[in-house]
Image: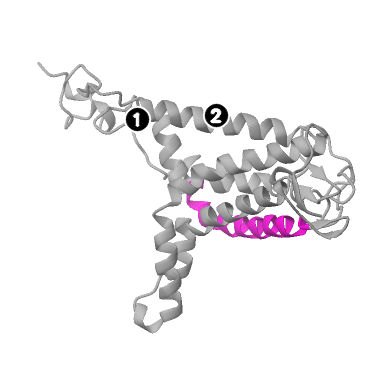
Amino acid sequence: MSAPTADRRATGVFSPSRAQIPQRTLRTDRWWMPTVWTNLGLAAFVIYATIRAFWGSAYYVPDYHYLTPFYSPCISTACVPGSSHLGQWVGDLPWFIPMAFISLPFLLLFRLTCYYYRKAYYRSVWQSPPACAVAEPHSTYTGETRLPLIIQNSHRYFFYVALAITLLNTYDALNAFRSPEGFGLGLGNLILTANVILLWGYTVSCHSCRHVTGGRLKHFSKHPVRYWLWTQISKLNTRHMQFAWITLGSLMVTDFYVMLVASGAITDLRFIG
């Protein structure tokens, strides 16, 4: 006999429309593996990025102008000489405020509100749902209509800030081609440049960027330039998930290499200059 109507929830796994079976799912495969890998991947980046953001040293190589993205822009008077490409606007910062306190919060919010990352951590961390045909543990669902998830709708605004920061990272990468002898090229340049290219791929493939170029248009034929841009970005948009994961790795690799060179653990492999 089914439970009294008063004891049932209107939505979620206890919904009257759901089959009343005791098992969470009838799937026999390892449906939980993608969730585990997603959690491990996100946790690895969060732990590494947090440690490095508050490390406070080994983020700039003066000879070759290598600046890690985790410290750009560095606008404190405590920044290593030469690393403040936008000037020094504030004095020494307490340990609990990262050097790149202007950019890091916006980049974090841009990624947190990203459509792909929402899918990733909703399923892996929040278990909503953890996999197809697997019931989630929550009894109700309100979507992104209430705090704090309603903040997700501000993603389009964080996109504009992320676009400006990507431009700044591009400047940092181009500036790194200077060496004491003039033009220089080393392994660090290749890593910084590759990272910037991937960051552009992630930023431009964003759903918000796709909407900016082609949204609110009723007749594509009347806007051929915007239609062409929308078409190209739509192609990149199909790879947004890949860019989302690859850039997490490229950011860590770039920062780690700059840290090793800046700390003197290794010397930069130079090809020119």
Q: Nearer the viewer, mark 2 or mark 1?
A: 2
Q: Which residue is nearer to you in this view: 194 or 68?
A: 194
Q: Which residues are magenta?
A: 151-177
Find numbered disc 1 in the image and state the secondary structure of the residue it sits on. Answer: loop
- C-beta proximity under 8 Å, tags 2 and 1: no
Q: Amino acid at mark 2?
A: Ala
Give the quarter of the image for residue 257: top right
Mark 2, residue position: 43
Is residue 125 among the parts visible in the rendering? no
Q: Is 20 one of the magenta-colored residues?
A: no
Identified at 89% across, 42% down, the residue is 78
- On the question of residue 6 being in view, the answer is yes
Q: Main secondary structure of the magenta part?
A: helix
- Residue 100 lies, in percent from the top left, at 74, 45
Residue 130 is labelled as 1
Q: Is residue 161 magenta?
A: yes
Instruction: Tell me which label, 2 or 1, sits earlier in the chain.
Output: 2
- Image coordinates of residue 17 in percent, x first then y, are 16, 32
200 lies left or right of 36: right
Q: Could you tell whether 166 is left or right of 204 in the image?
A: right
The percent position of residue 223, horizontal first and vertical second, equals 41, 81
